[in-house]
Amino acid sequence: MLELEKAQETILASIPAPKNETVPLAEAYRRIVTEKISASTDLPPFDNSAVDGYAVRSREITSATTQNPVLLQLAGKIAAGENFRGELSPGQCIRIFTGSTLPPGADAVVMQEDTQVDTNKPREVLFLDSAKPWENIRFRGEDIKRGATISTAGAKLGATQIALLAASGVAQVSSGRRPSVALLATGSELRESANASELAPGQIYESNRAALAPLIVAAGGIPSIFPIVPDDAEVTRMALSRAFAECDIVVTCGGVSVGEMDFVKSGFEELGGHLQFWKVAIKPGRPFVFGRHRDKLLFGLPGNPVSAFVTFLLLVRPALLRWQGATAVGLPASAGVLTEPFSNPDSRRHFIRVLQDTKGKVRSAGTQASHMLSSLALADGLVDMPPKTNFETGKTVQVLRWE
């Protein structure tokens, strides 16, 4: 059995270089950038007002108070998006709004709440408070300087990163092409959940494809859900052949162990595929197959739902991200404190389903058997526990998350 890190290393070393495509920024959410992006302009692109008020020469209102206001003449108005022709002269002020360009000659903006205008004398403004030089002014380039790196190759774009790119005038990005992923479930006992009235003794509803498809989407892949594959050698081989013909990556659930009805490995090899490894030293999820078929990849997951879920997160998700050019492919983690002791007497690492509350307290999500979906549904993370280890109550642990 391979250790988890060796399995991950083997998989990532097999991922081809990303194939770039140009993506409009409006469609770039969660896409992986494959080239460094530099700002083409300063941000802000010009000195501007941070408030609605009046642009002034700060030295002219140093003595202004509510009891002794200072009077200035209104020389004009600058709405957002407009420019002021000329320069602010001594004894003058200019009406200005949030985001308006700072007029030449001004070095401060006084909030309108600190001023007073007589409706009978609209060209005169009384200032009730002083202003420090450069008060309420946002300076050109104080956020981003022109030429600065605003996204690195391998970064995933979230909503905030897209906002920065848009503000910097970026209209499109170079991104790694998203992989198409065939999703197959094997097992003669499986039935589609839509056919609820047809469930007979010995049959179960298939759930792995429903669980994995959204995880594929979250990792940037494009899932293609194939029909359930019965336990038949020829049918399995034909299903794999079709999946490899249509998709970049094939993910199967079940049929990868050593039973008489496990045909995924043999079917894959009959198609010319090369098995890189099978069996990983983790719990749940020991029977796991990884192989290559020309420039395409096979991930054979266990059939038990929790095993399929965990092995996908640890071994398939990183591959999907790297396929698109991502540099960070690990699961996000948060620290937490155990509210109960954990024990792993097994010789394999155990990824325990846990629930973490808003205060960071971590507890078991329930029974840890690999077929128990109820504890997986309750869980919001995994704790990686080394072999033959005990964790005491109060221990700080890292909770691996998938959402």
Image (cartoon, rainbow, N blue to C red):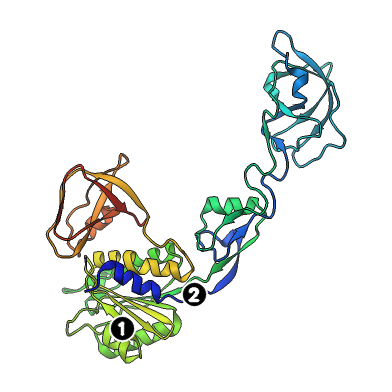
User: For the residue marked with disc 2, what is the amino acid?
Assistant: Ala
Instruction: From the viewer's perspective, tell me whether residue 12 is left or right of residue 142.
Output: left
Query: Looking at the image, which residue is at 83% across and 37% down?
Result: 84
Query: Looking at the image, which residue is at 76% across and 42% down?
Result: 81
Instruction: From the viewer's perspective, tell me whether residue 202 is left or right of residue 254.
Output: left
Contact (Cβ within 8 Å) of mark 2 with mark 1: no
Instruction: From the viewer's perspective, tell me whether residue 184 is left or right of residue 139.
Output: left
List x then y, in percent, for residue 174.
59, 66
- Label 1 sits on a secondary structure element that is strand
List x then y, in percent, for residue 188.
23, 80
Quadrant location of the N terminus in the rendered image: bottom left
Give the residue number, with chain letter if any, for mark 2. Answer: 17
Instruction: From the viewer's perspective, tell me whether residue 42 is left or right of residue 105.
Output: left
Query: Looking at the image, which residue is at 39% across and 74% down?
Result: 13
Q: Residue 130 falls in which quadrant of the image? A: top right
Q: For mark 1, does the 10 Å Cα neighbourhood hold few (<14), some (14 to 19), or many (20 or more) residues?
A: some
User: For the residue marked with disc 1, what is the amino acid?
Assistant: Leu
- Label 2 sits on a secondary structure element that is loop
Q: Which mark is residue 297?
A: none
List x then y, in percent, for residue 48.
71, 37
Q: Is residue 158 above or below residue 294?
A: above
| Number of residue marks | 2
Q: Residue furthest top?
A: 67
Q: Using the rendered image of the protein, determine whether residue 382 is visible from the camera's viewpoint.
A: yes
Give the residue number, with chain letter if any, for mark 1. Answer: 275
Q: Using the rendered image of the protein, determine whether residue 213 is visible from the camera's viewpoint.
A: no
Q: Residue 3 falls in which quadrant of the image? A: bottom left
Q: Earlier in the sequence, mark 2 or mark 1?
A: 2
List x then y, in percent, for residue 184.
34, 76
Quadrant location of the C terminus in the rendered image: bottom left
